[in-house]
Amino acid sequence: MEEKTFNVTIYTDGACSGNPGAGGWGAILMCDGKKKEFSGFDPETTNNKMELTAVIVALTKLKKPCNVELYSDSAYVVNALNQGWLENWKTNGWRGSDKKPVKNIELWQELDKLLGVHNVTFIKVKGHADNEYNNRCDALATGEIAKNANI
């Protein structure tokens, strides 16, 4: 009997108070009518690190290989995947077009491993607009900062 491949929808967002500064991330996973929310905090980070962390943590929550539609308002994350930046970085020994080491290399390498497990389509959404799930992820991320950084 063939194992079912799950279709999962994920929304992610990262936030930072100061850049660098205190940061938070939020993610929502939806599958078969179920929805789970996750969030976290880092006392000293960047917005891009929080955006990547949200994606990585969300994908690590999947227990089996899945087909994933991942929605993010981060051009940094979405463009790196959809415009081939990640593949170019790997081909060039994790160096960017400027020949300098890629920033956040450990996070990109972790995400790259997860992309070998799951079939992920990255979709860019407009941040702080009328997208219910993106707004909820933003609230989770900024809520973590407010709760943990005493801002």
Image (spheres, grey):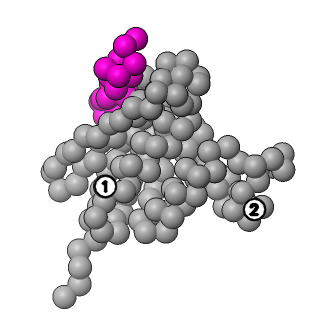
Q: Give coordinates of residue 120: x percent, y percent.
A: 44, 59
Q: Residues within 10 Å of mark 2 (few under 14, many from 20)?
A: few
Q: Give coordinates of residue 145: x percent, y percent.
A: 39, 22
The secondary element bearing badge 1 is classed as loop
Residue identifier under label 1: 61
Q: Quadrant of the N terminus?
A: bottom left
Magenta-drawn segment: 131-151
Q: State the residue lying farthest toward the bottom.
A: 1
Tell me if 113 is positioned left or right of 138 in this view: right
Magenta stretch holds residue 136: yes
Q: Residue 40 sits in which quadrant?
A: top left
Magenta stretch holds residue 146: yes
Q: State the residue lying farthest toward the top.
A: 151
The front one of 96 and 4 is: 96
Q: Give coordinates of residue 93: x percent, y percent.
A: 75, 62
The secondary element bearing badge 2 is classed as loop
- Kind of residue sitting beneath label 1: Lys
Residue at 50% in and 43% down: 52
Q: Residue 39 sits in which quadrant?
A: top left
Q: How many labels, in total? A: 2
- Kind of residue sitting beneath label 2: Gly
Q: Is residue 19 above or below residue 42?
A: above
Can residue 91 be seen? yes
**Distance of label 1 from label 2 (alpha carbons):** 29 Å
Can residue 16 be seen? no
Q: Residues within 10 Å of mark 1 (few under 14, many from 20)?
A: few
Q: Main secondary structure of the magenta part?
A: helix
Q: Which mark is residue 93?
A: 2
Residue at 43% in and 47% down: 55
